[in-house]
Image (cartoon, helix red, strand yellow):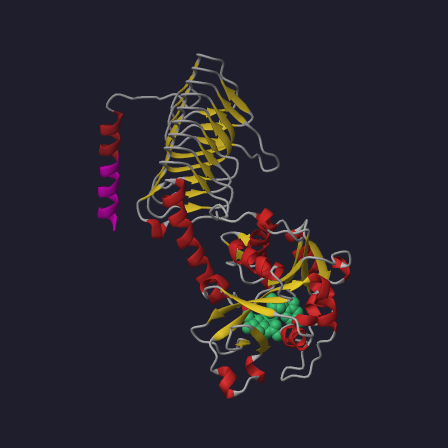
Amino acid sequence: MSDPVKFDPAALSEPVAAVLLGAGLGTRMKSDRPKVLQPLAGRPMILYVLDAVAPLEAERRVVVVGPEMAESVGAAVAPAEIAVQRERLGTADAVKAAREALRDFGRGTLFVLFGDTPFIRPETLADMAATREGGAAVVVLGFEAEDPTGYGRLITDETGALIRIVEHRDASEAERAVRLCNSGVMALDAARAWALIERIDNQNAKGEYYLTDVVGLARAEGLSCAAIRASEDELLGVDSKVDLADAEARWQRARRLHAMAEEGAVLSDPASVWFSWDTILDRDVTVGQNVVFGPGVRVEAGASIKPFSHLEGCVVKAGAEVGPYARLRPGADIGEGARIGNFVEVKNATLAPGAKANHLTYLGDAAVGEGANIGAGTITCNYDGYLKHRTIIGPKAFIGSNTALVAPVEIGAGAVVGAGSTVTQDVPADALTVARGAQTTVAGGGKRLAERKSAEKAARKKGE
Ligand code: UD1
Ligand code: MG
């Protein structure tokens, strides 16, 4: 969704590699799924961090995980590589786990990012890389925290140069008063990084190897370090299900604005529309209240999605109308100017231009021809309990209400199926077919029945 990136990666002259840390247990998430795979807008959050790195054209991308997550995270982030941190000994140790994978990356900018900060922007990373290329051995991304408790603090001198980072637990009262916090994102001079990181020890309150110590070590060698600032919003970390919901809400807000401002869609009640990471809306699409876009939806120009519709894995072509209360499932392809009305479900089915299914219908594993009309209550019986079968409905065919089309079955072009039919055999083009019990009418029979029944009832009452 993100807007076109406003920097030129060619402006950076040195190669880039990125290490994404994600071996933390994520205990507060209370989940069986690794934290970095928790979904944001239907997609693992670590992929947003990889997206932010992408415009920098990183030569190498290595994701550090614990042994038990190597498989699942590896599959999600491929083709980025995986490095396994055997024991969680701290952020510096986690970076060291990636060293082997980066053995031939000896020059340029080595980024360290966290897998749980999905809103980091490529422009910020580009700024950091440019500052690094300008001569800093270490560039740290900081932010002014509303509540700095728990964060590492960036200690700067009177010129603003970064001197060291102190973790909250190890900080003095005066240091804790500093509002500028460490986000955890760093850009290191790859030629010097490993020598510095190897010297980090675990003599601190947590007994961990802190990557943040790299700043003090670099300064002691006379190397310069710099801090770049970003907003707290951009550096939002996701640690719990509550944070996850908050991140989702922020993402959705931004996505709705993008739909209106960039895509040119009309949202009647933006706050009630729910997007997925890959939703695409063209110009002048209108979206009513309470519409949910699951993954894989494209809606073309001028189409209208009416209130309370749920779409997933489908395409709605130009000028088509969907809903209210429609459900489009994966493989639904709604042709130009076609109409899907209330309580209609479509799965793995194409509707050619101008086809209509306006009420109470299920179309599954079907192809509906141009201008065909599907009456209320039509069901494609696509599943026999073992296998799925296709229904083909020709152009301009007319399917009467409450028809069951028992697949595999084909209705020819222009054919008419009488209401209430259960169609088990193909219907040729232009034929009329009716497949229901014949209607029998007995003159005066209704009145005679009423008289007989009332007499029966009266006799029974008398005997009680
Ligand atoms: C870290 C920073 C702190 C900063 C804060 C920002 C250090 C020492 N401290 O603290 O200055 O303000 O982030 O949120 O770096 N991880 C591993 N392996 C480990 C330990 C951590 O992969 O052994 C990963 C975690 O999955 C996480 C990231 O590193 O993505 C940060 O770890 P975390 O334990 O959250 O560090 P903080 O204590 O929050
Ligand atoms: Mg943390």
The spot of residue 229 in percent (x, y) is 49, 66
Left or right of 445, for residue 44:
right
Q: Quadrant of residue 21?
A: bottom right
Q: Quadrant of residue 435?
A: top left
Tell me if residue 265 is in the magenta stretch. no
127 left or right, relative to 339: right
Q: Residue at x 56, y 63 (%)?
A: 116
Q: Who's the residue at 53% across and 77% down the image?
A: 157
Residues in magenta, as a range: 453-464
Give the farthest residue toward the bottom: 173
Instruction: Pick whichever, 247 or 31, lies toward us.
Output: 247
- Decide: is 255 above or below 426: below
Q: Residue furthest top?
A: 430
Residue 25 in sight here: no
Q: Nearer the viewer, residue 375 or 214?
A: 214
Q: Residue 139 location in percent, x, y? A: 59, 66
- Residue 67, percent from left and from top: 72, 64
Residue 169 seen in render: yes
- The answer to whether 251 is drawn above or below residue 85 in the figure is above
Relative depth, front residue between 357 and 451: 357
Residue 242, placed above or below residue 213 = above
Chief secondary structure of the magenta span? helix
For the residue pair 57 and 243, the one nearer the viewer reads as: 57
* Residue 306 percent across, percent down from the top left: 34, 40
> Total label count?
0
| Membership of 457 in magenta stretch | yes
Looking at the image, which residue is at 55% across and 28% down?
390
